[in-house]
Every structure is written in structure tokens, then in C-alpha cells.
Image (cartoon, grey):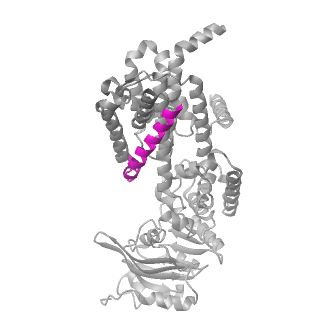
Amino acid sequence: MLDKKPDLAPAAETAVFLGTMPALELRAVSKQFGGLKALNSVSLQVAKGQVLGLIGPNGAGKTTLLNVVSGLLRPSSGEILIDGIDVTTWPAHRIAAEGGLSRTFQNIRMFAGMTVIENVLTGFHARMSTGLVSAVFRTPGERKQERQARKAAEQVLERLGLSEVADREANKLSYGLQRRVEIARALVSGPRFLLLDEPTAGMTPRETNEIMELIHQLRSSELTLVVIEHKAGFIMRISDQVAVLNFGSVIADGLPEAVRADPKVIEAYLGAGHAHT
Amino acid sequence: MSFDDLYFFFVIYEHTIATALINAIVALGVYVSFRAGIFNMSAIGFMALGAYTSGIIALDFGTPAVVGVVVGILVALVVGIALVFPVLRLRGHYLAIATLSFGAIVQALALNLDFLTNGPGGLVGVPATVRVWHLLIVLALLLYGAWVVQRSRIGRAWDAIRTDMAASRSIGINVEHYRLAAFLISTAMSALAGGLWAHVNRVVVPFEFGFGQLTVVLVNTLLGGLANPVGPVLGALIVSTMPDWLQQFDRFREIIIGLLLVVIVIYLPNGLVPRSFGLGFLRRRRSGIAGSTNAR
């Protein structure tokens, strides 16, 4: 590929097959770290209730993409839209609270020292409004919210099969369980978008299967999922739409079967020469 | 022990008790910053600001202590707001150094602004109108407030920010907002303690607001631990009464305090008071002891 055109074409194709207004849209998003172009004019669209699988070799810019979308990094150029609203300049906490976008991290980030239920309760933060005054005077509103938070946390723990470890210290659990707690913490606020950054990184095959099952369970018409993965087989099975990043650019975007057969993808993964085999 | 004995005991130790209670208020202020993960060393600086403001107002205008104390808090908050924005851009050690130098600046100003502070001689003759029971009420209210706040959404947000800022942002916590609030609460509590101190001690001198005092404040806060607000209060009460129950070692007090800080940081990073402070803790302790008996 010597002719470097801006990668707008794949996104336009996606829009045709989605048919509706995208819930999450990236328009020519770039991110530059000094001389390194981590994201090069990335355009993507995800429809509501769909699962977008994001794959690509190491250093392709997948995590940077997630950091930009969740507001932890500001893009160098381009726009990010949630339900058609431009959120490019929103700080991360606002994207989470008002945009309804939750995420997990590649290297699990538990709140150390907190129990499982406290971690999950903290995830309910944006749904509460307790201020200093209502906290000090323990107003009825504050108590009610606190009860709601606890109920929501207990429900999500139950749903993810974590009720039994609710009072254990979260960062002392097994890796697989910690990942579940992290997903529970992201889910408790009832987000409309859930971004999972390599949810099966460092997991045993059994734990990987459990997480895959969990992602299947999470699917609903109200929740839009973006999942980053290394394991191509895993991503093909869970996704409705797959996008492939390589050197910061989207090299393929579409239905899993189409992406799997794309020569550019095979080349990125296996190197030139395999494309026609 | 008759009532008279008790009365004399109180008269003799009143100043020690009052000092201990004031130290507890400062420790509680430092605790709020530390709980939010802000390595804030400005406590003594703001305490000096509160003490001088309160003392000057009492001496110049003859108003009751409460006026000076409140104005002291307001002055500290104004300075705190000016300080907080540049300071909170910093992290960890850098923030500690910046706030440490703030304390040094306040002390230098107190030493040199003679027209306002009377220089090294300090303010003398501030009416000693603050009594132990006043301090007890103030401390009890603050302790209650700190207790319920740390158990609320705010406390959880502070804990989250302390352990992982990016993860906190990603669940919708406005990190800057909560750090700002924690810093200003610490500021107000330090200034409050300073203002009260002026009316307990009668004298406000610059030498009482130096690095040595800051070390004591840190020991107070860390000895009890950050797990809950009872920790710093207990730590302050223990350390502040130490000179009296270790009277023969009084000369070595600063050495003992310094060593204590080293020992705490190395061997007792979580402090004395456990996280779930109450019956649950006692139960766990007892079963632990039973376990060791069985093993033997």
C-alpha cells in the first residue's frame, strides 16, 4: 500500500450496512505522541447494541484508541460523537457520567485496599449526587441513594457470580475474578457503552472461556460493546463488526467473515507473501 | 481520688490536654488530604495563618475568639484557593515539596513582617478564652463529620483517587473537583486549629510553626493511620501527651518523634487503627489469638 489515502472509505461502507445513526462514531481521529502517530485518521462507527471487536498487532494503537474515546487522552485532531453529540473535548469523568461510557483496563485496575463490593459501589459514583452537606447531615436523600447504590452493586455482583466474594479484598482475588470485579464496577452504573481492553489478557483458557460467556450474557439491545483483543478467534466469535488496526490506521472494518478473509488483514498478521495462500 | 485531686490534675494538665486536642484537629485536617492521595505538607503553614490572623484580630479589635478564628479560616481559604490550582497540578513528591515551601514562606513572613506579626517576638497577650470543653466540642463535631463523609460517596471517591486516578476518571469521578475539596477542607481545619491555638496559648511566635512541628503533625497522623478518622485523632492524643508521661526523656523528644516517624513508615504503614474499627476488629483479634493457641 504505497498510496496513503485518508481512511474514510471503510467507515462509509460500514455506515451503509449499519443503516441507522451510529451510537458511537469516530471521525478522522488522530493522536500524535511527539513524532509517533499512534492513531492516523481513524474513522469508525458502531450501532447501538452491537459488539465491535477491535484487533490488531501489538502497538497498533488499540489501547490509545480506547483512551481517546474514554477521554483519558485528548485526540490531536478529529471528532468523537456519542449519539450524534460531539464529546471530543469532554473530560473523562463527564464522558463516563453523562456519555454513559464505561471501560476496563488492560492491566486490571482495582482500587487497592477496597473490598469487592466497595469497588463496585464506587462505580456507582456518577449516579449519585451526595455532596459534602448531605453527607455530613446524612439527609434522607443521601441515605436513599446509598441504599440504591448498595442494591445496584449487589445485583451486579449476583449477575456476574461474585456475591460470594463481595467482602473479600478485591486486589487479592485471582486474576479472572478481578477482571469480573472490574467489569462489575464498569457495569453497575448502567452504562450505554462498555469498552473492554483485552479482557482475557493473561488468563487461562478456562478463564478466557468464562469471560467470553460473560460478554455473550452482557449483550443487549441497550448496551454497545467495544472489545479489544489479541486472540483473533475469540473476537470473531463474539463480534458483530470487526475493525483491524495496524500502525494507527484502520485497515479493515466490517463483518467478521469479510474481515477474516481480507488480504490486508492476513498480511498484517502473517506478513506479506501469505496473502494469496 | 477525690474531686479536688481530679480538679488539680486538670489544672496542671489543662494546657497539655488543650494542646493535644488542637493537634488532633490538625491531624484530622492532614488526614483528609492524605486520604484523597494528596501529599499535602501545608498544614503548619495554614495553622500559622489561622493563629496569626486570629491573634492579631483579638489584640487589635478586642473581639471574641470566634470572630478571629472564623476570619482566620477565611483568610486561609483565600490563600488556599490561590495556592490550590498550581499545587494540584503536581503529583506525589513534587506536591509535597511545593506545599512544604509554602509553610517555610509563611514562617519567613511571620518572622519578617514586623508591623503585622511583631517579628521573632510574636504576638503576646492574646486572651486565653478558648477552654478545653470548647475544643472537645469542636473536635467531636469534626470527627463525626469526617467519619460520615469518609463512609459516603465522597470518601469512596477519595479512596479511588488515591489508589488510581485514571480508573477514577473512567467511572465518572471528577478527580480535580474532589482533590480541590480535600485540599480546602484540610486548609480550613488547619487554620481553625491555629486560630484556637492562639486563644489557648496566649502567645503566637514564629518558631512554633516550623519543620519540627510539621514532623510532629505527620507522626500524629500516620501513627493512628489513614484507615479512618479515629486514627489521626488517637495518634495526636498519644504523641501530644508523650512529653508528660515520658518526662525524663523530654530532652530527647524531637529525636523520639523523628525515630517514631521512621519506625511507623517502615513497620506500621497502615497505622494503629484498623479499617473496620469496632466489634468486628475485636472478634478477628480474638480468633487470631485462639488460632495461635491451637497451633501451639
Seen in the picture, residue A119 relative to B200 is either above or below; the reply is: below
Q: Residue A47 in the image: state x and y as whole percent.
A: 57, 82
Quarter of image, res B234:
top right
Q: Is residue B72 magenta?
A: yes
Please report the residue visible at 50 percent of the width from the left and 19 percent of the height from the top.
B15
Seen in the picture, residue B279 relative to A144 is either above or below; the reply is: above
Let me know if residue A116 appears in the view: yes
Overall secondary structure of the magenta stretch?
helix
B126 or B240: nearer the viewer: B126
Give the position of the N terminus of chain A as an image quadrant: bottom left
Relative to A25, A273 lies left or right: left
Q: Is residue B130 magenta?
A: no
B214 or B207: nearer the viewer: B207
Relative to A75, A127 lies left or right: right
Please report the residue visible at 47 percent of the width from the left and 90 percent of the height from the top.
A12
Please report the residue visible at 57 percent of the width from the left and 90 percent of the height from the top.
A19
Seen in the picture, residue B233 relative to A134 is either above or below; the reply is: above
B113 or A78: nearer the viewer: B113
Q: Residue A114 in the image: state x and y as whole percent.
A: 57, 49
Let me know if residue A105 appears in the view: no
Q: Residue furthest front?
A: B61
Q: Residue B235 in the image: state x and y as whole percent.
A: 51, 30
Give the position of the C terminus of chain A as an image quadrant: bottom left
Q: Residue B153 in the image: state x and y as whole percent.
A: 60, 52
B22 or B238: nearer the viewer: B22
Please report the residue visible at 34 percent of the width from the left and 89 percent of the height from the top.
A5
- Magenta extent: B66-92
